[in-house]
Amino acid sequence: MIVGLLGGGVIGAGWAARFALNGHDVRLYDPDPDAERKVGEVVANARRAMRKLVMPALPAEGSISVVGSPDDAAHGSRFIQESAPERLDVKRELLQRASRAAPAEVVIASSTSGLLPTSLQDGMSHPERFVVGHPFNPVYLLPLVEVCGGARTAPATVAAAADLYRGVGMQPLVLGKEIDGFVADRLLEALWREALWLVNDGVATAEEIDDAIRFGAGLRWSFMGTFLTYRIAGGEAGMRHFMEQFGPALKWPWTKLTDVPDLTDALLDRLVAQSDQQAGGRSIRALEVMRDDCLVAVMQGLRSAAPGGVAAGAVLDRYERQLFGATPAPPVDLDAPAPVVAHEVRVPAEWTDYNGHLNDSRYLRIASEACDRFLRLIGVDAQYLADGHSYYTAECHLAYAAAARGGDVVRATAQLLHHDPKRIHLFIALWRGGDQLATAELMLLHVDTAESRACAADPTVLSTLERLAAAHSALPTPRQAGRSVGQPKSI
Ligand SMILES: NC(=O)c1ccc[n+]([C@@H]2O[C@H](COP(=O)([O-])OP(=O)(O)OC[C@H]3O[C@@H](n4cnc5c(N)ncnc54)[C@H](O)[C@@H]3O)[C@@H](O)[C@H]2O)c1
């Protein structure tokens, strides 16, 4: 699909990365002559971060063409996202122009942080296809997008935009009511205003204020937000007790509410100096890389915190399942007397260690992906899992033979050594061309996931295993099968 983007600054470039890395071709208009370079830098950062974030292969990357006018960007696009400066006149003109250039069924969204959709859609041709899709920086990593229609927006437009955003790994939050600043920015602004007061009044420095968030509340916010956190803070009596205890304090009040400090030169100088000291000479690009690495770590942590993940971890989990489902399993002849090719991956540079070699944990990751694909091949698909059955890995023996490097294409083959109704004994080999890189010998146990106990697999899974077993019975037992740690290689 082609996506048209209007504006390629911080947010527009983030959208370009999110769409292109999810396989969509992008046509981007930005009057800045330097836009192509800036977008390219953001996309390079995004590529690196996304490869770190997700386990399955991303789809083939879409192209990004920087075009000369908004009409060019709209041409042939099935969806348009505007991310021009936050000025009503600039946005209206662009949206009106794009709406005249794009057929009526093309949804047009705006990234505005706070302008009202009813006001933005004024004067557009077919305003019913307009919606706000308010993302968060970096757009390629943060899942949240607030989706908000105006008075003339059709409900189908809101649904279509939400579906499209979900398809590129995001979490749409559909707002029932338009309001200046939407929901997230109103919350952020309240905190930001208070932070400025604290600097203005000389109570705390920029760094101390950031510490107050990042060592405490910031950690909780990423998985529970505010309300659920405070419910727990109320102890066993929950929210009612919490409100009784801390509710009256709201009337004292501690905070400055809607007052804003005067943005005098003295306050700006103090803020800039404190911010410079905090950055410690690190460039914006270096800070972005650190930010992206930390976001990846947090989201991966939230995915593993509970089955199916928590908060942004649940979105990541759903997105990875989507990616797995979208990658067609390689065609396999179940009756061929050869190990099946279960997986192929190009080693990203970030998977290598200080020796330039594929880090040892990544061999297991590739073997584990190959094992997942083998299971899908024999019928353990999303429905099978939803029905309460799966295979769990009971044992794994990894043997390393040669080093892989960044950029190498690694192919994984799977040979069925043995099976019975409850178990699969599987042998996976990783190859670079004809060179064997590693082998993994696995024992998988079929389980009833609700009861967490072993049980017999479904008859259709077993009959596929029978077919594979018949084909693989002619294969020699691999030399490494059954080895113990430290055994001489000649054995
Ligand atoms: N920066 C954020 O954290 C953030 C977060 C969410 C939403 N937003 C919203 O996204 C939008 C863009 O913000 P940004 O931070 O990317 O700003 P930015 O200044 O980084 O980028 C704006 C881009 O628009 C280009 N531009 C100027 N006039 C244009 C025109 N007529 N047509 C097309 N492009 C034009 C500029 O050259 C620039 O590259 C704003 O509406 C903002 O409120 C920003």
Image (cartoon, rainbow, N blue to C red):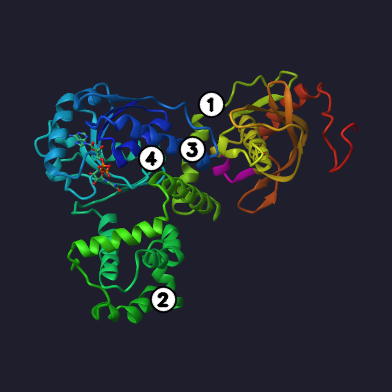
Label 1 Cα crowd, 10 Å radius (few <14 / some 14-19 / many 20+): few
Number of the label disc, if any, that sits on residue 234? 2
Q: Secondary structure at mark 1?
A: loop
Horizontal and vertical percent position of residue 448: 64, 48
The amino acid on which the numbered mark 1 sits, given as a three-letter code, is: Pro
Ligand 1 quadrant assignment? top left
The residue lying at 39 percent from left, 41 percent from top is 140
The amino acid on which the numbered mark 2 sits, given as a three-letter code, is: Gly
The residue wearing badge 4 is 166
Let me know if residue 388 is in the magenta part: yes
Number of the label disc, if any, that sits on residue 328? 1
The residue wearing badge 3 is 48
Label 2 Cα crowd, 10 Å radius (few <14 / some 14-19 / many 20+): some
Instruction: Determine whether 447 is above or below 237 in the image.
Output: above
The amino acid on which the numbered mark 4 sits, given as a three-letter code, is: Arg
Label 3 Cα crowd, 10 Å radius (few <14 / some 14-19 / many 20+): some
